[in-house]
Amino acid sequence: MARKVWITGGTGFIGSHTWVELAAKGYYRVFSTDNYLNSYPEVCRRIEAITGTRAVNYPVDIRDSDALREVLRREAPIDAVIHFAAFKAVGESMRHPLRYFDNNFIGLIRVLQMCKEFEIPHFIYSSSCTVYGSHTDEPVSEETPLGAPLSPYGLTKQAGEWMIRFAMREIPMNAVLLRYFNPAGAHPSGLLGEDPRVEDINLVPIIMRVAMGRRDELVIYGSDYPTRDGTCVRDYIHVVDLARAHVLALEYAINTLPSNALEVFNLGTEEGITVLEAVQTAEKITKRTIPHRMGQRREGDVPAIRSKVDKAHRVLGWRPQYTLEDIIKSAWEWEQHRTATSTHLPSSTTGSVANDRTKKDGV
């Protein structure tokens, strides 16, 4: 019998790619709750085009207990939840911490309450490398002590992990916490990729917009970090590799992890790429110049962070299959498709950001 999986934030960047990977397995039935605050209904049509299966999303805010309960009553019984839905930007969280606390904390609380009420036994949590704070020793492993949060976003992810740990005292479920680094790229079909309603905040999509001429330039925040070229070092992971890891984590939770047990996995490539190196790679692949200039450091950023992922290799049997070149190539193909087919693209704007930490799907 097929397992039923609830994805929160299923039409967002990582949620939609994970949905595709689950559907490809053939033995999962997936539904999503996403109110399209940072995504579009057409994502469901893209998922259907790729998978050949119906994509069911309920456009509700997960903080609304009554609306959420109505959805889950219709879909019960439910075998697992993968929780992506959260506001996601370090910089924005510095400007609007209360907004982040309200959405990310209350949203997680409501999902946990529903897990208890509807007896959902498996929980996969979208966490982040931001939980490590500013560690000078890297790569970081799952045993690296959690550092002081550098942003409200990082605080919500770190506290979210603890909320799940303590909630399991009264919820009969197991949980897998996935701390991932910098998701980027797009689906190989060219039909699915990063397509937020709000201003682009992640490095690779901004590079693509500049290459396409939809932005005038890229602003790199910080050129005096103690790295090989002065710009931040990040660990970029292809979104399809990341989606595969969520499927493996779910199968581990269902088939191997004991009830009321919790495991943590880093998900990255262990490769550190500077912002300038990413720009240079994009220029090579797109065969276009990426105009960029250096700006001041941005509050909340760390100089460098890379993952140590041997635990995911050993326990989940997961290894990333895509390179930085693959990430850039797929993102470029997606950007060209997006520009040709989407009707909601903003006009060209001047300036943007780089030095992104891990960002994820929004509710």
Image (cartoon, grey):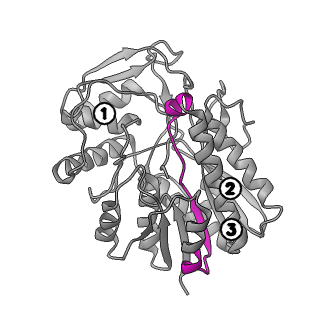
Is 262 displayed left or right of 220 in the figure? right
Q: Tell whether label 2 touches label 3 (CB within 8 Å).
A: no
Left or right position of 291 against 150: left
The magenta segment: 72-95
Residue 264 appears at what percent x and percent y?
Answer: 69, 52
Local packing at callout 1 (Cα closer than 10 Å; few below 14, some 14-19, many 20+) is: many
| Quarter of the figure that contains the N terminus | bottom right
Instruction: Locate residue 6 relative to residue 198 in the image: left or right.
Output: right
Report which quarter residue 323 is drawn in: top left
Which of discs 3 and 1 lies nearer the camera? The answer is 3
If you read the primary sequence from the N terminus, does the residue marked by circle 3 or circle 2 appear first? 2
Q: Local crowd at mark 3 within 10 Å, few (<14), some, or many (≥20)?
A: many
Image-based side of 119 in relation to 318, left or right: right
- Disc 2 marks a residue whose amino acid type is Ile
**Secondary element type, mark 3:** helix
In front of the other: label 1 or label 2? Answer: 2
Question: Residue 207 has which mark?
Answer: 1
Dot 1 or dot 2, earlier in sequence: 2
Q: In terms of depth relative to the viewer, which is nearer, 291 or 41?
A: 41
* Residue found 73% across the figure and 55% down from its top: 164
Q: Is residue 7 above or below residue 214?
A: below
- Mark 3 vs 1, N-terminal side: 3
Tell me the amino acid under the disc marked 3. Answer: Cys
Badge 2: how crowded within 10 Å, few (<14), some, or many (20+)? Answer: some
The amino acid on which the numbered mark 1 sits, given as a three-letter code, is Ile
Question: Residue 115 shows which numbered tag?
Answer: 3
Alpha-carbon span between mark 1 and mark 2: 36 Å
Q: Which residue is mark 2?
A: 109
Nearer the observer, 23 or 140: 23
- The Cα–Cα distance between marks 3 and 2, rounded to whole angstroms, is 10 Å
Residue 307 visible in this rendered orientation of the protein:
no
- Report if residue 131 lies within the magenta region: no
